[in-house]
Image: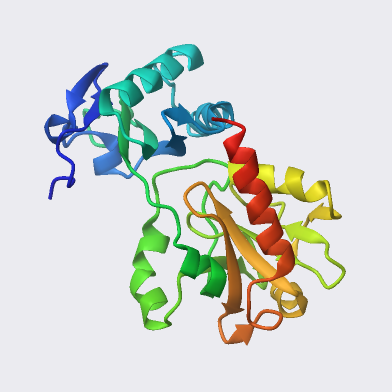
Amino acid sequence: MMPANANLYAYIHGQFTPLQESFLHISDLSIQRGYGIFDFFKVQGGKPVFLQDYLERFYESARLMELTVPVTSDELTAIITQLITKNKLPQSGIKMLLTGGYSANGYDPGEPNLLLTEQPLVLPEQETIEKGIKIITQEHMREIPRAKTINYSMGIRLINKIKEANASDVLYQQNGVVTEFPRCNFFIVTPDDTIVTPDKDVLLGVTRKNVLQLAARKYKTETRTVTMADIAQAKEAFLTSTTKRILPIVQVDDRMIGNGAPGKVTKELLADLITLEQTQL
């Protein structure tokens, strides 16, 4: 099924191509073995938000996965600018994807393929923010947590389980130590208003970084091990991501967080984050 907006352009094979005509050969390792990395950032008012942070993480993910980005950071920035100009979307998200390339034997990497796509972006509804979300937990840890790979097999496999629990997302944990969501970072607020997020075996989210910096202006912050027992004692919890910004978590599995409603600290940090984003425009 093609995307609803068939008038958009993508960047692939070194050129801009109508999205509906943009394809990879079946020999690409992203198809054969699920080998590749990506990153994703917001565009508001024609301007990328926190672009430099996302570019740095993209190149670091490539390094960790032994992939070479075929263009420099400055060249990639120019490509992004051209794509935004061609698509003319008021609010969007751009995905940068680097694959293992066309493989002669379906295993050995070839020349990496660089793809960029841009799609309209819808942020969480105010009703969801005001109500908060329920999440469930799952025993799992991503293979290379610091790399933003295209392997989301576990998260996708759990979609039906999440729906059956009337939840919104799944938090990975291993032996009672929590790490991250498939696409988001996790935070708790302790009873003394300390902002805490896991420090190991997680993707270093750009929104996570910004929230830690914003929180440090008003509160004590810690990056450390977070356990299921810590969650049980937390007064607030929330997740962070590029597309969701900050979403309050009011229930984890069968346990309510705090009084079961989004907390003051979470809502305050969301307001601060939105203000920070506006400075990028």
Where's the C terminus, which quadrant?
Answer: top right
Identify which residue is drawn at 30% across, 44% down: 33
Residue 217 shows in the view: yes
Q: Does 132 sit above or below residue 151?
A: below
Relative to residue 259, is residue 74 drawn left or right? left
Residue 204 shows in the view: no
Q: Does 109 sit above or below residue 198?
A: above
Relative to residue 27, is residue 255 drawn left or right? right
Query: Which corner quadrant of the image does residue 98 belong to?
Result: top left
Q: Nearer the viewer, residue 77 or 110?
A: 77
Q: Does 28 sit above or below residue 225?
A: above
Q: Position of residue 264 (x, y in %)?
A: 72, 67
Colouring style: rainbow
Query: Which corner quadrant of the image does residue 16 belong to?
Result: top left
In the picture as drawn, the residue positioned furthest to the bottom comes out as 254
Query: Which corner quadrant of the image does residue 265 belong to?
Result: bottom right
Q: Position of residue 266 (x, y in %)?
A: 68, 62
Identify which residue is drawn at 70% across, 58% down: 268
Q: Nearer the viewer, residue 221 or 264?
A: 264
Q: Position of residue 124 (x, y in %)?
A: 45, 59
Q: Position of residue 50 (x, y in %)?
A: 57, 32
Relative to residue 109, is residue 267 drawn left or right? right
Relative to residue 90, is residue 271 drawn left or right? right
Q: Nearer the viewer, residue 155 or 46?
A: 46
